[in-house]
Amino acid sequence: MHTSPEAGRGRAALMLCHFAGMVDLVALPVWVGTLAQHHGFDLEHAGMIVTAFLLGAVGASLVAAPLYIRLPRAACAFGGYAVAALAFLAASRVAGFGALAALHLVAGIATGTALSVTHGTIGRSANPHRLFAMAGTALGIGAVIFYAAVPPAVAAHGGPALFLVFAGLMGAAALACAFGFPNVATGGRAPSAAPLPRAAWCAILGVGCLALNQALTFSMLDRIGVLRGFGQDKVNGVLVVCGLVNLLPAAVAGMLQKRLNPVRVAIVAAPLQAALALVVTLSADFLPYALAGAIYPAVLIFTHTFLFGLIARLDPSGRALASTPAMMMTGSAIGPALAGSVAMRAGFGGQALLAILVGAAATLCFALVASRAHPSLKEAI
């Protein structure tokens, strides 16, 4: 049963699919913390399990994105989320590193496929910036519910509770796809075989750097707070506040669509993100840690909304935006394992230095976007 992205049912399906597919943006600190605390893994191995999911999503997105025009998109979305639900259900019943890593990989491949066609469909809607802002707002609402409900459930019922939540979320997304995944025209807006503009590639690389910095710091937010002696209850409180704050950035980005230049937004956001990472990783006091941690994800959500709309204009075919999971999750995939490894070998100070380097790379990428744009695309930036 198909509908359009502008219809209520289609929008609802896309928003739920976006939340399910981008669950790592919300769940990373709880995910890594649960694997460390309730399954007994060190930070490096906990990060590697989460990385297996994200690497699977990246690989699937890299395969699916170039084929977006030809894929049976509704079937891919439904099948991907259904398989992911089954994989997480199985993960709730095992405890070994190998089994959990393998199931996470399967779930990641399935989720990445479904999310690629979701983002490609948003990118071919009448107003991609606005629809992506709505999806980001849905992600913020979901984050509030997640942070309020899931950490206490995990504390009460153990690590398997987290995977049951993931399974339920993926299953709900599959049902939404079955009854309302939108159908979009695939002909007319741009030649599907045309090379991606250079500016689009620079924007893609910049988004990847932002996602990497997000994952490096946010995946360790729980562990940093606990190891600094702030207490698990206080850290959980920071996550709840973080969810409340994240209700705002996508909605505000949607309202400011016509008022702010997306490249300028990104050039300001990249060093701001790195500065907040320094506060989170280096602060010995709870208040600076809590304030920076609470607003940290909002920077990426706000900025990515503008960049999503920009890339949609630079590449109207939908292929570049179908690779959004690869853009976001390449950084996210590297982040948890790299952050755990750096934290164990160089401490949280090593993480701070890494955040500065990645932030500088992101800033350079966005500075190149305008200079690399084809003259016919200058009006997009």
Image (tube, rainbow, N blue to C red):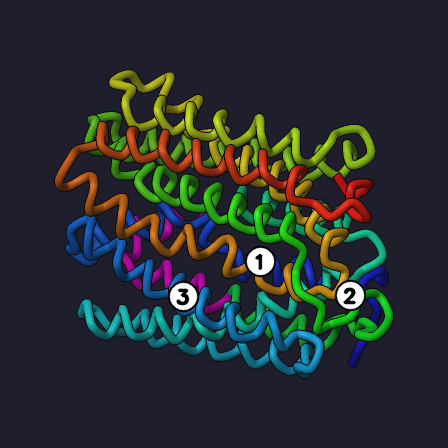
* Mark seen at residue 146: none
Judged left or right of residue 130, residue 321 is left
Corner quadrant of residue 76: bottom right
Q: Is residue 146 magenta?
A: yes
Residue 308, above or below 100: above
Looking at marks 3 and 1 on the same chain, the residue that comes earlier in the sequence is marked by 3
Q: Which residue matches tag 2? A: 10
Residue 93 spot, x, y in % from top left? 28, 73
Disc 1 marks which residue?
A: 324
Amino acid type, label 3: Leu
Q: Nearer the viewer, mark 2 or mark 1?
A: 1
Q: Earlier in the sequence, mark 2 or mark 1?
A: 2
Is residue 307 something one can see in this rendering? Answer: yes
Q: Element under label 3?
A: helix
Mark earlier in primary sequence (3, 2): 2
Residue indicated by mark 3: 164
Residue 292: x and y in percent read 43, 24
Distance from label 3 to label 1 (Cα)? 26 Å
Predominant secondary structure, magenta span: helix
